[in-house]
Image: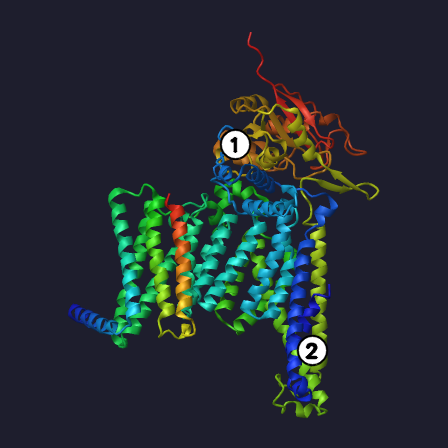
């Protein structure tokens, strides 16, 4: 049972890897950005676990800015991905403009909330 | 009255005008005809919306015309006072305001404990008007804010209806919500309360979110986040949005309607909306710490899991491998989520549902544990008569609309069905929440009306077309050009359709009559000025409240402290400009219980409590002379219950006789000697109130009072208004010790 599960996991991992190599470069860049944002959020949470969460609004604004940019980047990826049927008549420039606008609002609120 | 129902009919007639025979017969003028029709339709729509906008505004002006332009009720006086402060001192002072004039000696951090949306909106309108050199007083702006936003709500209802169904439903929705009594009750001119802008913000947020889900655009999701921010700044009822939207997303996920558009709409709105909402000090960190907001976070995490699974499924083309992966991921995600929630709730980090909202899920909770919530009359369960009063024909149009929504299920109709059902459930639990259900009921009923009228009129048009070509009813079904095929066995369909249409118009006109009558009779009273009919049918006004507050303002020292029951606190600070002990904010139950204890004790004990609170004046409301039934004697048992909830020395059964509340000779001795009784009935025993009854006859209770010979030792009467409704007493300083 365990052996088949590990074999399944290895198969999974290999097929995922081979499928991922085929994605276009611009999507890979966005994926890298998302991973970076989530990684930064995790570092902040670890730091909070070490030193405590005293200015809680600062902690929240830091973590939420990372999660927010990650989520917005994922939305951009969805809209820009040529294989998504629903968004095939959405210009990528429009998607990027929406992305920039939302990020602007996000960071303005973060700066206000940072304290 | 009938005018607004006609446009729905001619609107759908206009859309079916481009029928084949007209095109065939006037081929040369086809293009110009089509253009004209479209322009006609646009003109018709804009003029209907304009008329509805004006109608919504003027239907709410009854009290301004009958009495004067003043603020009604109790809570609006606090809002008015804070708006006045905002326009005088500016936003920074307002945001950091600590008020020492209420809740003496504790004070109240107003800047951090109010929802600023309403005040900022009114102040912005005021400053805009001043910029255009219209120098109006802020009170006029405050009085007319609610009707103005009600008009704006009708516009949002039109767009929402257009999004869910079509323009016809949008127009009918706008008309229905313009005069629906459920909404008018809390948005009449003078009712300067949070709900005035909150319902507009609620409907706007829902419309923008449904638009975002339908289009999948980030821009619309951002707009809905801003709509949510406006709602959070306006009213504590935003908790309804932050729970309904995740519930809706969950229902879509369960019914297999997960899509990328949903992902984009919900995530953008949740993150940005949560961040914006936390800028309001009163809300603070509740979005990550309170149990009421955890549903939204849970659904957010669930969406990430769904997206991830979708992506993995797309990458792998092997279903077997994917199934195992799916099983592992889903079980681990649920386990992790469950453990986190359990840990959070057990350790107390995630606070449980507050009493106000918990009593919606368990209606019996407040009565047993929190008497102050149970005592508010707006929090009582709704009777059927209230539903009929506030909704009229919409009550049976609502199930009809639900039927149409289920026939044509889409993301948008699922939303409106969920909104309608959940809000109706809550409206059944608490009378005040009929207001929240009103937009949903109006929209769904509009769908029913619009779809029915459209079917009937297209039936009429088809019949006319068949009779024009001169064929008998036998040829009607074979014509491929007709949009509606006729049933051969029903020869009187045209007559039936006309009869049904006449019936629909009759219903809608009765609805309009009912709404106008209800607005005029029931929902346009300012509560601070009472009216009655005299012996000859003339109208008599009782302006005692304002008389008393202005007496306080002009005849007491500026640092005087007034003790009264919490209902009148806001009005005393706003109009009397004096410090009060407790007011309508009811944030400190012990302080209110102390006042309740003072009112229920005998004069000596009450004097001790009043000295400890530095009270200079006591204000009571008494309806025995005029027959006014919302006075302090009728509220007295709540004072006893709330006082007894904190101080066990006050026991409710001691004030009752055989479980009955009496003020006549048979009343309990504790009742006859308590401070409230003495202050209300002081010198009342000498007054003859009604012809043929003995002196001291209490018209509100309908009995002759028990203790007529009242002597006050530590207080003296300072002022009684002309109809004895408000009575003010001065607390005497302690006698000199010799």
Labelled disc at residue B497:
2
Which residue in the rendered view is the most extreme toward the right? Answer: B536
Is label 1 on the same chain as label 2? yes
Which chain hosts label 1?
B
* View extreme (top): residue: B738
Local secondary structure at mark 1: loop
Residue closer to the observer: B28 or B530? B28
The circle on residue A36 is: none
Q: Please, is residue B162 above or below residue B96 in the view?
A: below
Pick the quarter of the image with the C terminus of chain B.
top right
**Residue under label 1:** B103
B683 relative to B653, above or below = above
Residue B429: image x %, image y %?
54, 53
C-alpha distance separating marks 1 and 2? 65 Å
- Up the image or down, A16 lies above or below B69; here it is below
Q: Is residue B263 visible?
A: no
Residue B465 spot, x, y in % from top left: 69, 86
- Label 2 SS: helix
Counting from the top left corner in percent of width and height, residue A52 is at 28, 42
Check the residue under mark 2 and report the chain it is in: B
- Which residue: 67% across, 42% down? B70
Which of these two is toward me, B434 or B90? B90
Q: In the rendered structure, which disc, 1 or 2, sits on the residue that comes first in sequence?
A: 1
Question: Foreground residue, B698 or B407?
Answer: B407
Q: Rate crowding at label 1 as few (under 14), some (14 to 19) or many (20 or more) other CA atoms within 10 Å.
A: many
**For mark 2, does the 10 Å Cα neighbourhood hold few (<14), some (14 to 19), or many (20 or more) residues?**
some
Where does the image place residue B323, in percent across and percent down from the top left? 28, 72
Quadrant position of residue B172: bottom right
């Amino acid at each position: 049972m365990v052996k088949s599960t590990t074999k399944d996991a290895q198969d999974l991992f290999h097929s995922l890897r081979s499928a991922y190599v085929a994605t276009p470069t611009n999507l890979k860049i966005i994926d890298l950005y998302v991973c970076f944002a989530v990684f930064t959020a995790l570092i902040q949470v670890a730091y909070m676990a070490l030193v405590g969460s005293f200015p809680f609004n600062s902690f929240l604004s830091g973590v939420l800015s990372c999660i927010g940019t990650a989520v917005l980047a994922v939305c951009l990826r969805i809209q820009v991905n040529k294989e998504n049927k629903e968004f095939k008549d959405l210009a990528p420039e429009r998607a990027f403009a929406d992305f920039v606008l939302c990020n602007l609002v996000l960071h303005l609120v973060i700066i206000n909330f940072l304290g | 009255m009938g005018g607004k129902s006609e446009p729905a009919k001619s609107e759908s007639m206009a859309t079916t005008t481009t029928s084949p025979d007209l095109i065939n017969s006037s081929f040369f003028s086809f293009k110009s005809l089509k253009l004209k029709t479209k322009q006609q339709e646009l003109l018709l729509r804009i003029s209907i919306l304009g008329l509805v906008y004006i109608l919504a505004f003027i239907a709410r002006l009854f009290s301004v015309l009958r009495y004067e332009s003043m603020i009604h009720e109790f809570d609006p006086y606090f809002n008015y006072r804070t708006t006045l402060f905002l326009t005088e001192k500016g936003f920074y002072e307002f945001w950091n305001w600590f008020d020492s004039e209420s809740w003496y000696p504790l004070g109240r951090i107003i800047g951090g404990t109010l929802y600023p949306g309403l005040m900022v909106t009114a102040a912005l309108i005021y400053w805009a008007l001043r910029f255009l050199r219209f120098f109006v007083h802020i009170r006029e702006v405050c009085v007319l804010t609610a009707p103005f936003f009600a008009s704006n709500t009708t516009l949002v209802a039109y767009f929402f209806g257009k999004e869910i169904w079509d323009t016809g439903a949008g127009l009918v929705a706008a008309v229905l919500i313009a005069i629906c009594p459920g909404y008018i009750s809390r948005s009449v001119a003078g009712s300067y309360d949070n709900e005035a802008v909150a319902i507009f913000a609620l409907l706007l947020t829902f419309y923008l979110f449904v638009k975002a889900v339908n289009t999948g655009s980030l821009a619309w999701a951002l707009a809905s986040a801003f709509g949510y921010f406006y709602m959070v700044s306006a009213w504590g009822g935003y908790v309804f949005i932050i729970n309904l939207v995740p519930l809706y997303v969950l229902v879509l996920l369960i019914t297999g309607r997960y899509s990328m558009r949903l992902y984009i709409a919900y995530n953008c709105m949740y993150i940005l909306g949560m961040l914006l909402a936390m800028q309001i000090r009163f809300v603070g960190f509740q979005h990550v710490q309170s149990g009421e907001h955890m549903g939204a976070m849970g659904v957010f995490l669930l969406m990430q899991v769904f997206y991830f699974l979708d992506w993995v499924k797309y990458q792998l083309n092997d279903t077997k491998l994917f199934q195992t992966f799916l099983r592992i991921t889903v079980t681990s995600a649920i386990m992790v989520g469950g453990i986190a929630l359990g840990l959070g709730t057990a350790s107390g980090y995630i606070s449980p549902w507050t009493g106000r909202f918990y009593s919606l899920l368990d209606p019996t909770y407040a009565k047993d544990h929190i008497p102050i919530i149970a005592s508010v009359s707006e929090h009582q369960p709704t009777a059927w008569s209230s539903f009929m009063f506030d909704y009229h024909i919409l009550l049976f149009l609502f199930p009809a609309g639900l039927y149409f929504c289920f026939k044509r299920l889409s993301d948008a109709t699922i939303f409106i069905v969920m909104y309608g059902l959940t809000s109706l459930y809550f409206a059944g639990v608490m009378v005040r929440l009929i207001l929240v259900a009103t937009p949903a009921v109006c929209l769904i009923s509009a769908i029913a009306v619009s779809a029915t009228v459209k079917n009937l009129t297209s039936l009429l048009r088809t019949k006319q077309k068949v009779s024009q070509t001169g064929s008998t009813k036998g040829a009607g079904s074979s014509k491929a050009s007709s949009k509606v095929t006729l049933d051969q066995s029903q020869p009187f369909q045209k007559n039936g359709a006309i009869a049904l249409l006449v019936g629909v118009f009759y219903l809608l006109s009765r609805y309009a009559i009912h709404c106008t009558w209800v607005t005029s009779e029931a929902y346009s009273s300012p509560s601070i000025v009472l009216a009655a009919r005299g012996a000859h049918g003339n109208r008599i006004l009782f302006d005692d409240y304002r008389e008393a507050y202005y007496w306080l303002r002009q005849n007491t020292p500026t640092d005087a402290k007034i003790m009264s029951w919490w209902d009148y606190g806001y009005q005393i600070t706003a109009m009397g400009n004096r410090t009060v002990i407790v007011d309508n904010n009811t944030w400190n139950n012990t302080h209110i219980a102390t006042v309740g204890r003072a009112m229920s004790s005998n004069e000596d004990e009450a004097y001790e409590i009043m000295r400890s609170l530095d009270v200079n004046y006591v204000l009571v409301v008494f309806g025995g002379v005029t027959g006014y039934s919302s006075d302090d004697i009728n509220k007295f048992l709540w004072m006893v219950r709330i006082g007894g909830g904190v101080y066990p020395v006050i026991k409710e059964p001691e004030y009752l006789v055989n479980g009955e509340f009496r003020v006549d000779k048979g009343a309990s001795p504790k009742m006859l000697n308590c401070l409230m009784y003495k202050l209300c009935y002081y010198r009342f025993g000498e007054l003859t109130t009604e012809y043929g009854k003995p002196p001291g006859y209490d018209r509100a209770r309908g009995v002759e009072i028990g203790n007529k010979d009242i002597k006050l030792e530590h207080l003296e009467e300072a002022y009684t208004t002309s109809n004895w409704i408000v009575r003010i007493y001065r607390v005497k300083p302690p006698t000199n010790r010799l």
